């Protein structure tokens, strides 16, 4: 019998697990896919928002500002790439400038630190590649950028290290309740638990309905992106937003923590799990982004992708105990700024469970560390020492990102081991560079097969059915 079962291991499920792992509880996380962070937490803008956008007084505003503070703290502690680069919302006309005033007012009410409105000239001094038509900007120095999948993985890894049980490839299919919850899953295994956390992202309404009436409906909104080569990574230093609208925060231009330039997203009503991109969507993104930063060289695009926002009919996260099932906590409809808010949502979830009657006793020991070796960032003496210790550090597999065989092997035997080519990529960046795995993925594939003791035809690119090789050619 578990005390708490968390459904879904995106950034919200991982943050809840990370928080609950500090307590003397039996906790399980059930994730439908073969890895953590494969939903919205993988495909987003990767921005730690300052918190001037949500409505003052809302839960979203509170969790955004607190989540921003916690995200930097946790990312630094757990070796997650993060940078407090600041952001600008740019105004092109008087109406936009009025909007900036409104955002500023909200930000002050929400308790956002280091917020100011600056002129177009001041904005161009900070960001010389801004369009000459920019008439003013809201500067938020507390905004930042992060690796969203590494953040999710880091919190999930620490949770697992501290006793939380993670079940991958385990899709929840039905839930029954008597004195406790009985959760059935695609694995055939039944999980019994006193409390449930629903962190199932775009499926959170479906999971909520497994125990009761519909209290909210997910209305998926897709967002498409360009990811440009590092040659474009210094086009801007801060996150450049345009004025947001009711569907999303508008098209942005930003550096990523890996040194690329990210441009997007649009906001189009979509269907769950449709991660395809369209010429129409991308053209809109390109056209809109060029208004803010006209010199972006889109020919240096190395990848397009899309993410799905778990928007609902409410202008708020759907957080709280289900009206139909006591002990069932929804952390649902976590749209943007959910990545930023996640850590604060995790803490709030623990407080809510406390109020719902869960007995909480802090563990005497909690290992809140996560050592990571990123070979290319090390000084030469350290590199030489590692190569002497393990010659696999001397074999560079991903040339674009300088990722060594030893780092790939480590990813395949880590606390939450990678089981696919993209899983390796999320853990050590192999395949993330300019050639997008064109050169290294056959070599990564071979290492995966060798390390996991499987045939090369069984190696997956990402989820179930994404086998890279179809069959072996007969030898002649
Ligand atoms: C285009 C876009 C841009 C965004 N930009 C930002 C940004 O810059 N900054 C920011 O703060 N936020 C941003 N967000 C929002 C942020 O990405 C999300 O709020 C956050 O990732 C939500 O996390 P989650 O854990 O709730 O959902 P997810 O990451 O989707 O995780 C849900 C998990 O539940 C699993 N699951 C679903 N159904 C089941 C089931 N039946 N059984 C078991 N498991 C199940 C899924 O496989 C998935 O892994 C953006 C979102 C999008 C889509």
Image: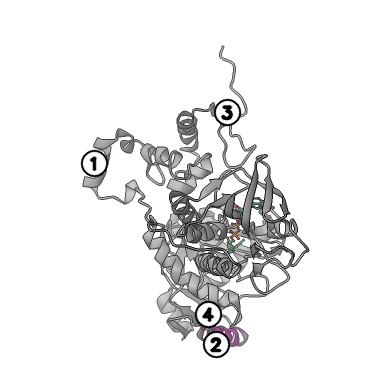
Q: Residue at x 45, y 66 (%)?
A: 71
Residue at the extreme front: 179
Left or right? Give the position of 143 relative to 44: left
Q: Nearer the viewer, mark 4 or mark 2?
A: 2
Q: Which quarter of the frame holds ligand 1?
A: bottom right
Q: Nearer the viewer, mark 3 or mark 4?
A: 3
Determine which residue is flagged by label 2.
Answer: 105
Tag shown at residue 25: none
Determine which residue is flagged by label 3.
Answer: 457
Determine which residue is flagged by label 1.
Answer: 384
Find the magenta span and give its range.
96-107
Tag shown at residue 134: 4
Vertical comparison of 136 with 236: above or below = below
User: How far separated are the C-alphas under marks 3 and 4?
Assistant: 53 Å
Q: Position of residue 306 (x, y in %)?
A: 62, 56
Disc nearer the start of the sequence (4/1): 4
């Amino acid at each position: 019998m578990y005390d708490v079962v968390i459904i879904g291991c995106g950034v919200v499920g991982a943050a809840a697990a990370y928080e609950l792992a500090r307590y003397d509880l039996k906790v399980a996380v059930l994730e439908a896919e073969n890895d953590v962070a494969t939903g919205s937490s993988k495909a987003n803008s990767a921005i730690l928002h300052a918190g001037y956008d949500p409505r003052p007084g809302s839960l979203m505003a509170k969790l955004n500002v607190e989540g921003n503070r916690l995200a930097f703290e946790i990312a630094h502690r757990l070796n997650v790439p993060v940078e407090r680069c600041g952001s600008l919302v740019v105004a092109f006309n008087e109406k936009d400038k009025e909007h900036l005033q409104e955002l500023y007012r909200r930000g002050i009410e929400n308790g956002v630190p280091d917020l100011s409105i600056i002129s177009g000239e001041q904005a161009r001094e900070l960001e010389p590649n801004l369009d000459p038509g920019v008439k003013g900007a809201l500067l938020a120095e507390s905004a930042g950028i992060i690796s969203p999948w590494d953040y999710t993985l880091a919190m999930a890894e620490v949770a697992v290290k501290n006793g939380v049980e993670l079940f991958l490839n385990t899709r929840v299919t039905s839930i029954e309740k008597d004195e406790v919850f009985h959760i059935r899953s695609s694995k055939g295994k039944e999980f019994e638990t006193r409390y449930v956390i629903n962190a199932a992202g775009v499926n959170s309404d479906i999971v909520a309905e497994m125990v009761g009436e519909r209290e909210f409906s997910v209305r998926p909104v897709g967002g498409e992106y360009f990811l440009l080569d590092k040659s474009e990574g210094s086009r801007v230093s801060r996150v450049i937003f345009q004025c947001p609208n009711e569907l999303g925060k508008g098209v942005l231009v930003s550096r990523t923590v890996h040194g690329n330039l990210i441009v997007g997203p649009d906001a189009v009503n979509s269907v769950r799990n449709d991660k395809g991109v369209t010429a129409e969507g991308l053209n809109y993104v390109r056209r809109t982004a060029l208004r803010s930063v006209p010199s972006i060289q889109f020919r240096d695009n190395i990848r397009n992708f899309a993410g799905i926002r778990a928007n609902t009919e409410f202008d708020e996260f759907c957080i709280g105990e289900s009206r139909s099932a006591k002990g069932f906590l929804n952390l649902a409809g976590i749209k943007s700024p959910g990545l930023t808010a996640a850590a604060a949502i995790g803490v709030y979830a623990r407080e809510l469970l406390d109020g719902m009657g869960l007995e909480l006793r802090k563990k005497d020991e909690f290992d809140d560390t996560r050592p990571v070796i990123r070979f290319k960032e090390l000084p030469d003496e350290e590199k030489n020492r590692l190569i002497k210790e393990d010659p696999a550090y001397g074999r560079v597999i991903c040339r674009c990102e300088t990722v060594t065989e030893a780092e790939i092997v480590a990813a395949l035997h880590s606390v939450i081991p990678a089981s696919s080519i993209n899983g390796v990529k999320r853990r050590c960046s192999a395949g993330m560079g300019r050639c997008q795995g064109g050169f290294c993925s056959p070599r990564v594939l071979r290492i995966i097969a060798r390390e996991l003791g499987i045939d090369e035809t069984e190696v997956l690119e990402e989820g179930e059915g994404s086998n890279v090789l179809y069959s072996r050619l007969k030898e002649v």
